[in-house]
Amino acid sequence: MVQTSGYTATAITQTPQTANITTAIRAFLLAIVPPGIPVQLAQQNRTVAPSGPFALVTLLNRQPLATVAQADTATTSRFCLPEDVTVQVSLFGPGAGNNAQCLATLFRTPWACQFFETLTAAQDTPQAETGLTVADWLANPPSPSNATPHASTATETGSQKATAITPARIAPLYTSAPRQAPFISGERQFEEHWLLDLHCQVNTLLTLPTIMAPAASVALVQAETVTDKPTP
């Protein structure tokens, strides 16, 4: 048996989540690749490859950059961990090599930093207003209403709901050099396929109820004999 804190998994709030990170990277790719090229997640079931050029996004690794910072209040505990998130971008079809080189070049520039800053600042959330330092995140955490990665909005009919995923606040670090990999289509034809790894910083924030006692009770027990003597 393993003793737990007694809190269920739903009591822990995590931001940003994987979907928020991939949404931000996808927005960056759509701003660079030629119009009309779809950008999708790589690992999906029952999904065929698009016809023509396309791009795929895969999260490969999440490497901590520092130790976990903790801040406690009367009701919650917040833990912040800066991470180096590695995102692999796969580009297929004619012009994939040129798109990969353009992506690798721009990701290393201040233009990319400004793009992600503008992307999150437009949402008008506490997460977008704070800096990328651990101290800023702990001092100004996202509100519970913005902590969930999916924000549902009703459609015109009111019977269905569309899901909008909020892009995460990330900061570009560096990228690998574009490299070519073999790719054979369903018609057994070689097609262009280029890969590169994007490294970006993401500050993961976990919020959970504080483990504390609401009150302390003291009971008096009469001792008939002295029991605190050391045993020989």
Image (cartoon, helix red, strand yellow):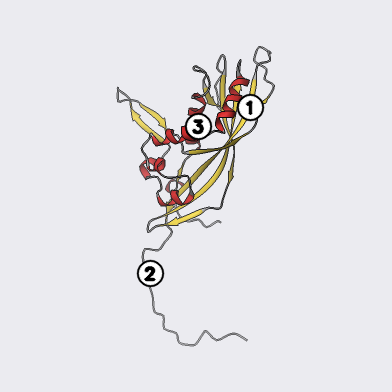
Q: Which mark is residue 216?
A: 2
Q: Residues within 10 Å of mark 2 (few under 14, many from 20)?
A: few
- The amino acid type found where label 3 is placed reads Trp
Q: Which residue is mark 1?
A: 195
Q: Earlier in the sequence, mark 3 or mark 1?
A: 3
Nearest to viewer (mark 3 / mark 2): 3
Q: Which residue is mark 3?
A: 111
Q: Is residue 210 left or right of residue 40?
A: left
Residue drawn at (64%, 21%), measured in percent from left and top?
A: 193
**Residue 42 appears in the picture as rendered:** no
Residue drawn at (36%, 37%), measured in percent from left and top?
A: 124
Locate residue 222: give its quadrant: bottom left
Which residue lies most toward the left here?
Answer: 157
Q: Residues within 10 Å of mark 1 (few under 14, many from 20)?
A: many
Locate residue 96: give its quadrant: top right
Nearest to viewer (mark 3 / mark 1): 3
Q: Is residue 13 above or below residue 150?
A: below
Q: CA distance from mark 2 to mark 1?
A: 60 Å
- The amino acid type found where label 1 is placed reads Leu
Name the spot of residue 188 as percent of width and height, x first.
68, 13
